Image (spheres, grey):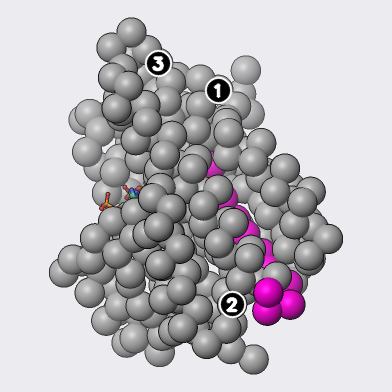
Amino acid sequence: MNRCAVVTGGGSGIGRRLVLAFAEAGYTVAFSDRSLSDSTDSLVAEAEQRGGSVRGFACDVGVGPEVERFYQQVADWFGTAPDVLINNAGVQTWAGLLELEEDSWDRVIRTNLKGCFLNTKAAARLMIDAGKPGSIVNIGSGCNKLAFPKLVDYTASKGGIEQFTKAAAVELGPHHIRVNCVAPGAIATERTNGEAAGYADKWAQLTPLRRVGTPDDIVGPVMFLTGPDAAFVTGQTLWVDGGVFSQA
Ligand code: NDP
């Protein structure tokens, strides 16, 4: 049977890698990004070369009407409800609490936390209406365990995602929809490439496995949580951080 997956923020980094992973696993994949570009076109082409069926949609995950339209388009294209949703889209600002602007706080919370809520609600509604079991994975962060300076908005959003995961798992469990969270450590992506020089080396030194992660490291845990081997796992957070956040 044709399985269908939705990945938010699929145009780059971890999301892009997950789009390709689901396509390679035989899923039909719809992804959202704030806007479509040459880069998202090349992702579709790459997935198609690998035999996958992938389509990108412009949708801001934090804007209700855009999310509603996105799931109408997705359901029309799939011809059914999604089996899997990966809430991956995320942003951060680097500002201390005392300097952080209200607009920046709103943007981070709206994208990371409200986006997770809006997409979960819309996807779960389609799954329930179709009588389909489903699996949702929210991409959290190591910030759920340890706090860092200049990430107060991001930390609040990711802590919220971990708690949202538990609450959604409780409500959606009776509908046979599982909800889990993957919390990455430092992962080298387009986003972290923009960090200060020495970022990767610093994190490699701090990490017990002595390297930063790559988007490939996120694939296996997400496939496990969305797949049949995790059929009795819900409401959990799986840390994919090379051990860095297990340290005192
Ligand atoms: P990237 O910035 O590389 O990718 C994020 C993607 O989300 C981009 O394609 C971006 O599009 C998209 N996006 C941003 N805002 C929105 C929005 N409002 N609506 C739709 N799409 C949006 O980030 P990463 O791959 O590094 O991060 C992916 C997830 O993993 C995030 O949730 C992040 O918090 C989390 N994470 C990452 C870690 C890391 O070290 N990389 C560590 C821990 C967690 P655009 O390019 O247009 O902005």
- x then y, percent, for residue 241: 54, 40
- x then y, percent, for residue 191: 29, 44
Of the two numbered discs 1 and 2 in the rendering, the one whose residue sits closer to the viewer: 2
Q: Are marks 1 and 3 in contact (CB under 8 Å)?
A: no
Q: Are marks 2 and 3 in contact (CB under 8 Å)?
A: no
- Please determine whether, in this image, residue 149 is positioned above or below residue 241: above
Q: First in sequence: mark 1 or mark 2? A: 2
Q: Residues within 10 Å of mark 2 (few under 14, many from 20)?
A: many
Residue 149, disc:
3
Q: Is residue 130 magenta?
A: yes
Residue 81, disc:
2
| Circle 3: element type | loop
Amino acid, disc 1: Leu
| Circle 1: element type | loop
| Circle 2: element type | loop
Residue holding disc 1:
146
- Alpha carbon of mark 1 to alpha carbon of mark 2: how far? 37 Å
Does ligand 1 reach within 8 Å of label 3's beta carbon? no
Which of 73/165 is in front?
A: 73
Which of 94/51 is in front?
A: 94
Does ligand 1 reach within 8 Å of label 2's beta carbon? no
Amino acid, disc 3: Pro
- x then y, percent, for residue 79: 52, 87
